[in-house]
Amino acid sequence: MNFGFIGVGDMGLPMVRHLLASGHSLSVWNRSANKLAQLAGLGARIAGSPAQLMHGCDVIGLCLTSHHAVEEVCCGSEGLFSKAESRQAARPAAIVDFSTGSPEAAQKMAARAQALGIGWVDAPVSGGPRAAATGELTVLAGGEPAAVEAALPLLRAVAARLTHLGPPGSGQTTKLCNQLIVACNVLAIAESVALARKAGVDTTLLASALQGGFADSRPLQIFGPRMAEHAFEPRLGAISLMEKDVLLSAHMADALGAVTPMLARARELFARARETQEIEPEGDLSQAVLLFEQLADGPLASAAQPSR
């Protein structure tokens, strides 16, 4: 199989490295070219544009920051679809969108792709860069059965767990539910680390002390020690991207009339984190601990208390 891949950010780069290390034939394009030289050295073919990458690929993967970026890469003047209407144009069997975006956008992109004879699978991932580097991601797939079948070679190459959840948009819907849990979990971990520090507990022992108990989780074991030590590099997930996912989840909940008070509180806290001087919006999720430390010690402490 000849794979194509667009987007080599925090998740896309380890995914591409894993595919190359596994011996797959791979063409790559990225909006910023600074990371492409190292991939060429690993055997990747570097495409000059998404339209150029379209030629000769059996399945193409996308891993971008938002559904807006996905639409631009597919529908722009040199996008994947820009020459696909030509009868002579080579088309992949499927495009797999590993990005996190709105279910409605996924449905629209699936319809556009289907009109061109291309399968579309919204397949947002969970597991973080570490799982991406080892091909052990959890993939939440939405799409027509034939599209998912056509995409299986790429999906199986990156995933330890793959679930086809239903028609186009189903993968994104499930991922937004996932992000609700992750966002609230990360904030709870940050709040707990800040509380333990204020109480005089050695926070570097917190994650290991709670390991195996009911409070344990993978985010606790990954982010807890980083929060305790204020070790925010390398980035394992950006504050800004989590806020974007929280907003998408809130929009979905509002459209459905769902009651999501935890999500509403997470939305408020991530907005406050973005406005906190010590926190870099593009910085690691672990920086959320700085919000609670500032709230505990500063004039905003009373504002952090829930209304009565």
Image (cartoon, grey):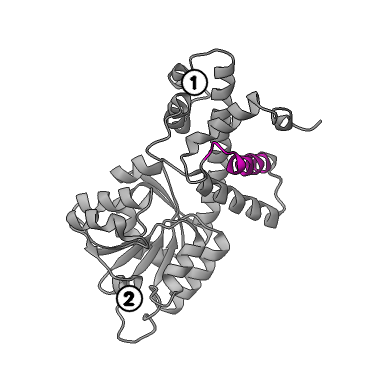
Is label 2 in a helix, a strand or a loop? loop
The amino acid at mark 1 is: Gly
Q: Residue furthest bottom?
A: 87
Q: Main secondary structure of the magenta part?
A: helix
Give the position of the C terminus as an image quadrant.
Answer: top right
Q: CA distance from mark 2 to mark 1?
A: 50 Å
Q: Position of residue 172 (x, y in %)?
A: 52, 55
Which residue lies under the disc numbered 1? 213
Give the position of the N terminus as an image quadrant.
Answer: bottom left
Query: In this picture, is 85 found above or below 36?
Result: below
Q: Crowdedness of circle 2 by 10 Å Cα count: few (<14), some, many (20+)?
A: many
Tell me the number on the disc at residue 91.
2
Q: Residue drawn 42% across and 56% down? A: 98
Q: Is residue 274 magenta?
A: yes
The image quadrant that residue 46 belongs to is bottom left
What span is in magenta? Answer: 262-279
Q: Earlier in the sequence, mark 2 or mark 1?
A: 2
Tell me the number on the disc at residue 191.
none
Q: Residue drawn 55% across and 60% down? A: 103
Q: Position of residue 144 (x, y in %)?
A: 45, 66
Q: Residue drawn 59% across and 27% down? A: 293
